[in-house]
Image (cartoon, helix red, strand yellow):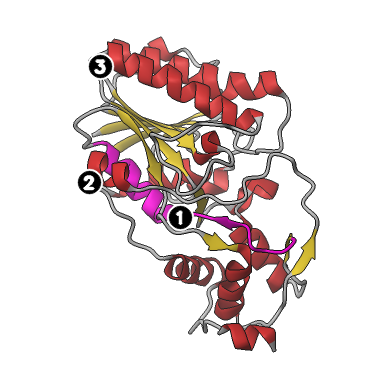
């Protein structure tokens, strides 16, 4: 099998590329390295094209069996609207044109940011109400992709990622998951900082499950956009309890005021369509995912989950 992974030097893209290659696929990574990092591709032996998706001459690329389009600006604090729309919308137009021409399956990254603060659990059939330009760019990309899906003969699957965490995200800097950022603060001896009062919650999904959903999308019988989440919302207070437990620490949260007007208070995926369209179900609970993740990046031994009573002490 041959595959292209755009944004393949990024967090999710590199995990997809490495997993595909481990299964014997011939993989081409496309990444301009503006936010990606070569270190995420340690152990990858395929070709790497160092170009922006919007700048590459897609007509010169050989046909492949599937394109995984992960390239995007994912930093939700970027306010340059033109830059965001060009990176996240115009790029998918280029990828779609290539896929239609070559009758190639497309799996692309969408986002739960399209839902904004609509009531949880968020469903694909519910209201889409993005709060910032990032969410809006993903909303438009979904509309563009599904219009092509209705008119073309190819299968196009959009995956609305909820809050992804896991290996190879550390190079994202401020855009890395809260799980990584909180763990780093705790390991440095600092109290983990979260918005007051820590009851805000997210559907956190381990990157290995996200990769699994991408591979399942290769077998989808029809096009569509589906949520990729666990269906469980976890508060930031609970995250700190879990991380403290794994690291064997006892640091209480340091609360501060939320400065963002476009903040999502609760995300929780409805997973009915994920199971129906892709036949996929996540494997990791939040506790299992964090344990394996932190154990991997910090080479920890025998992690201990602290109880709420232990945390309070």
Mark seen at residue 121 = none
Residue found at x 80% / y 47%: 259
| First reached walking from the N terminus: tag 3 or tag 2 | 3
Task: Please identify the quarter of the rendering in which residue 223 is found.
Answer: top left
Residue found at x 45% / y 55%: 205
How far apart marks 1 and 3 lie (CA) works out to 31 Å
Q: Position of residue 210 (x, y in %)?
A: 40, 48
Are the residues tagged 1 and 3 within 8 Å (C-beta)?
Answer: no
Query: From the viewer's perspective, is 126 left or right of 272?
Result: right
For the magenta stretch, what is the residue range?
196-218
Q: Identify which residue, 172 or 153, lies in the foreground.
A: 153
Q: Quadrant of the C terminus?
A: bottom right
Label 2's element? loop
Query: From the viewer's perspective, is 38 left or right of 286?
Result: right
Q: Position of residue 37 (x, y in %)?
A: 59, 42
| First reached walking from the N terminus: tag 2 or tag 1 | 1
Residue found at x 44% / y 25%: 142
Determine the residue located farthest toward the left in the rendered image. 221
Q: Position of residue 86 (x, y in %)?
A: 60, 18
Query: Disc 3 or disc 2, which is closer to the eye?
Result: 2
According to the image, label 3 marks what residue?
A: 103
Query: From the viewer's perspective, is 94 left or right of 307?
Result: left
According to the image, label 2 marks what residue?
A: 279
Q: Few, some or many C-alpha atoms within 10 Å of disc 1 (few <14, some 14-19, many ≥20)?
A: many
How far apart marks 3 and 2 lie (CA) works out to 23 Å
Q: Is residue 212 magenta?
A: yes
Query: From the viewer's perspective, is 146 left or right of 255?
Result: left
Q: Few, some or many C-alpha atoms within 10 Å of disc 2 (few <14, some 14-19, many ≥20)?
A: some
How far apart marks 2 and 1 lie (CA) works out to 17 Å
According to the image, label 1 marks what residue?
A: 205
């Amino acid at each position: 099998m041959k595959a292209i992974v755009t944004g393949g030097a990024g967090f999710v893209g590199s995990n997809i590329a490495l997993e595909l290659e481990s299964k014997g696929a011939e993989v081409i990574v496309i990444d301009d390295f503006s936010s990606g990092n070569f270190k995420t591709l340690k152990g990858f032996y395929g070709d790497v094209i160092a170009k922006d998706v919007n700048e590459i001459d897609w007509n010169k690329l050989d046909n492949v069996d599937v394109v995984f389009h992960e390239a995007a600006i994912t930093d939700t604090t970027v306010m340059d609207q033109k830059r965001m729309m060009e990176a996240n919308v115009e790029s998918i137009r280029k990828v779609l044109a290539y896929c239609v021409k070559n009758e190639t399956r497309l799996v692309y990254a969408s986002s739960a940011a399209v839902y904004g603060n609509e009531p949880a659990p968020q469903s694909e059939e519910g209201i889409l109400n993005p709060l910032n330009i990032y969410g809006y760019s993903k909303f438009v990309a979904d509309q563009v992709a599904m219009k092509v899906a209705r008119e073309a003969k190819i299968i196009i699957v959009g995956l609305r990622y909820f809050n992804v965490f896991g290996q190879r995200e550390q190079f994202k800097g401020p855009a890395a998951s809260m799980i990584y950022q909180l763990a780093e603060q705790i390991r440095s001896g600092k109290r983990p900082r979260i918005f007051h009062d820590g009851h805000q919650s997210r559907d956190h999904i381990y990157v290995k499950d996200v990769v699994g959903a991408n591979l399942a999308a290769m077998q989808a019988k029809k096009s569509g956009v589906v949520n990729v989440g666990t269906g469980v919302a976890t508060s930031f207070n609970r995250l700190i309890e879990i991380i403290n437990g794994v690291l064997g620490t006892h640091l209480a949260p340091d609360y501060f005021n939320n400065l963002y007007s476009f903040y999502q208070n609760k995300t929780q995926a409805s997973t009915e369509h994920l199971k129906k369209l892709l036949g996929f179900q996540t494997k990791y609970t939040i506790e299992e995912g964090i344990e394996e993740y932190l154990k991997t990046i910090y080479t920890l031994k025998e992690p201990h989950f602290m109880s709420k009573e232990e945390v309070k002490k």
